Image (cartoon, rainbow, N blue to C red):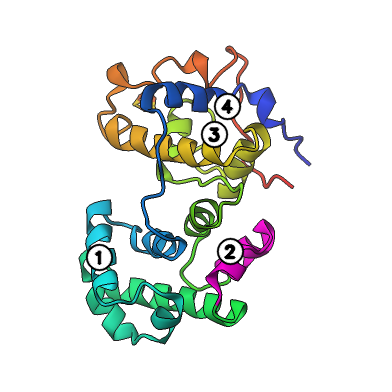
Amino acid sequence: MKTRPAPSETGFDPSALHAVLYAHYGPSRWWPGESPLEVMAGAVLTQNTAWRNVEKAIANIKDASLMDLEKLARADEAFIARLIRPSGYYNLKARRLKNLVTMVHERSGGSLERFLNLDARDLRSALLSVTGIGRETADSICCYAANKLVFVVDAYTRRILARHGVIDHDADYDDVRVAFERSLPESLDVYKDLHAHIVFVGKDYCLRTRPRCGQCPLRDEKAWAASGPSRSPVPTGRVP
Ligand code: SF4
């Protein structure tokens, strides 16, 4: 069985990454949303679309007075689909949103607060049991709606870390998540800001083609990604 080095042995320092990005961006005040339910809805609707489209869909849900667990769980799926049309893939997303709120309503007896107060492991497990809710969406809800110390890994995280040789391109989601969680301080602000800042870098600098490395706050990789030439990637096997 392959011996896996601890993340600290790879030269990757998530706390240093946070320090560099916080110095550049400051507090992120993420996730945008007026309530935990709105954050949950946003986490479902943001898949494969720009945030401005999510905002329109959320505004429609609010205008219809449906941003309420009980009402949303009882709402007709086709009606939800019409409301969230601006977010794209609206039939699929309506089903996912309906699946999610139905599970939460049934599991918590109608109390979103009770559901979000579940232990992080149970909360994550419940979210992942919903068809169409993947790990990134579940972890976004855990971190930003339920205020749990769960780090969100997204495509930008993977792109940035892979481009700097910190992880393999096909690194397992949970290995990358755990690498962050093992090294970061137990601070919700740090978890929330760091994921947000990584998204900002992905949108502002680390573009899919033609990354703008010359202007990027992460251009000095020795400050956060590597301790020296002996750096090795974060392992791709599942971290227990
Ligand atoms: S844009 Fe920034 S994060 Fe992306 S590869 Fe260049 S220096 Fe790294």
| Earlier-in-chain disc, 2 versus 1 | 1
Per the rendered image, the range of residues in magenta is 111-127
Assign a secondary structure to mark 1: helix
Q: For the residues labelled 2 and 1, say whether their Cβ atoms are less than 8 Å apart.
A: no
Is residue 113 magenta-colored? yes
Q: Mark 4 points at which residue?
A: 15
- Per the model, the C-alpha gap separating discs 3 and 4 is 16 Å
- For the residues bearing labels 4 and 2, Cβ distance under 8 angstroms: no
Q: How far apart are marks 3 and 2 (CA)?
A: 32 Å
Q: Amino acid under label 2?
A: Leu
- Secondary-structure class at tag 4: helix
- Drawn side of residue 86 relative to residue 166, left or right: left
Q: Position of residue 7 (x, y in %)?
A: 66, 30
The residue identified by callout 2 is 116
Counting from the top left corner in percent of width and height, residue 26 is at 40, 28
Residues at badges 1 and 3 in contact (C-beta under 8 Å)? no
Compared to residue 146, the image places residue 83 above or below, namely: below
Q: In the drawing, what numbered circle is on residue 167?
A: 3
Q: Quadrant of residue 22?
A: top left
Q: Quadrant of residue 239?
A: top right
Q: Name the residue under label 1.
A: 59
**Amino acid type at image mark 1:** Ala
In three-dimensional space, the C-alpha distance between marks 2 and 1, rounded to whole angstroms, equals: 23 Å
Name which residue lies at 68% across and 37% down.
Answer: 182
Question: In this image, 132 relative to 15: left or right?
Answer: left
